[in-house]
Image (tube, grey):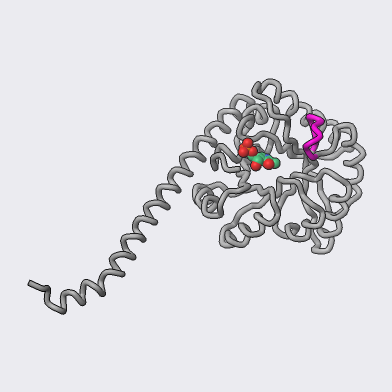
């Protein structure tokens, strides 16, 4: 027997509502699951940082965990933010601007950690707290000009090419003093320390030498110019524990938090 007409009509009308509810609850579950996985991953990295600090007899608060979020979607950054991670470092200006817009509602502390073209400085100068990759005079001049224009003192780190690699940016250790002097005379720029990306070495003891070189260079500048340089930005997924043992105050971690993605 055919169903009465009122019944068919009701089923037809109800269908979209039921379908919507069902999808909504699956998405909700998925979000919750992703979030709890992200929190678990963050917790594991946190524990490793804590243990490295203990080994080095340092306080956990002395080391900032910076999520290196190049190629990481905004939604994932949002999840990690929900787990308590507040500082993220971006490498590419276009990508950064998009995420900055999409995540406007969050109180993220944004850093810029990639190679920075002078003509892009104007887009990021009012959006980042720390630029890790100051490595040449033309960039210093542009940063000075743009920071001054918006009445900001831009905090920066000088990137040092500790491995003398041609493919990498960074000031050569031998040129660091001269470059630092130029930075001192730029009154809208404040150098807070040094940053490096050492050559990749499987053997962590080989990487240790590059980190201790960066620390020595920082301490020499402090002594010679009577200034305090509180930061050493060094250590990534593969080597952050050694970096902490050698004095890192900022570790930039991507793969370990967000997975392989490039
Ligand atoms: C400057 C800089 N620091 C840190 C990282 C993070 O490296 P890893 O994925 O090995 O943690 C990257 C890579 O995105 C980077 O370019």
Q: Residue at x 68, y 25 (%)?
A: 201
Q: Residue at x 12, y 73 (%)?
A: 3
Q: Position of residue 60 (x, y in %)?
A: 60, 35
Q: Quadrant of residue 6?
A: bottom left
Q: How many marks?
A: 0
In the image: residue 78, left or right of residue 242: left
Front residue of 217/100: it is 100
In the image: residue 101, left or right of residue 32: right
Q: Position of residue 131 (x, y in %)?
A: 74, 48
Q: Quadrant of the C terminus?
A: top right
Q: Residue at x 63, y 59 (%)?
A: 98
Give the magenta-colored segment's residue range.
160-169
Q: Position of residue 16 (x, y in %)?
A: 31, 69
Q: Residue at x 70, y 31 (%)?
A: 247
Q: Position of residue 26 (x, y in %)?
A: 35, 55
Front residue of 58/116: it is 116
Q: Main secondary structure of the magenta part?
A: loop
The magenta stretch spans residue 80: no
Q: Quadrant of residue 52?
A: top right
Q: Which residue in the rendered view is the most extreme toward the bottom? A: 5
* Displayed-image quarter of ligand 1: top right
144 vs 257: above or below: below
Q: Which residue in the rendered view is the most extreme toward the front? A: 1
Q: Quadrant of residue 191?
A: top right
Q: Quadrant of the N terminus?
A: bottom left
């Amino acid at each position: 027997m055919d169903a009465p007409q009122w019944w068919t009509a009701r089923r037809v009308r109800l269908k979209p509502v039921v379908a919507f509810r069902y999808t909504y609850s699956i998405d909700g579950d998925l979000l919750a699951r992703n979030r709890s996985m992200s929190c678990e991953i963050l917790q594991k990295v946190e524990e490793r940082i804590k243990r490295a600090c203990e080994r080095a007899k340092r306080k956990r608060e002395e080391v900032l965990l910076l999520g290196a979020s190049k190629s990481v979607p905004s939604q994932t950054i949002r999840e990690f933010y929900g787990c308590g991670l507040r500082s993220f470092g971006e490498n590419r200006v276009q990508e950064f601007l998009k995420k900055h817009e999409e995540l406007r509602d969050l109180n993220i502390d944004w850093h810029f950690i990639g190679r920075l073209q002078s003509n892009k400085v104007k887009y990021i100068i009012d959006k980042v707290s720390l630029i890790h990759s100051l490595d040449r005079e033309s960039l210093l001049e542009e940063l000075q000009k743009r920071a001054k224009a918006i009445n900001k003192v831009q905090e920066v780190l000088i990137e040092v090419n500790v491995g003398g690699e041609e493919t990498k940016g960074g000031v050569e250790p031998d040129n660091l003093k001269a470059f630092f002097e130029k930075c001192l005379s730029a009154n809208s720029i404040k150098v807070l320390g040094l940053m490096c990306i050492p050559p990749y070495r499987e053997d962590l003891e080989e990487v240790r030498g590059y980190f201790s070189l960066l620390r020595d260079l920082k301490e020499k500048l402090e002594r010679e110019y009577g200034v305090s340089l509180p930061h050493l930005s060094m250590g990534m997924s593969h080597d952050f524990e050694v970096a902490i043992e050698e004095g890192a105050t900022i570790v930039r971690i991507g793969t370990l938090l967000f997975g392989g993605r490039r």
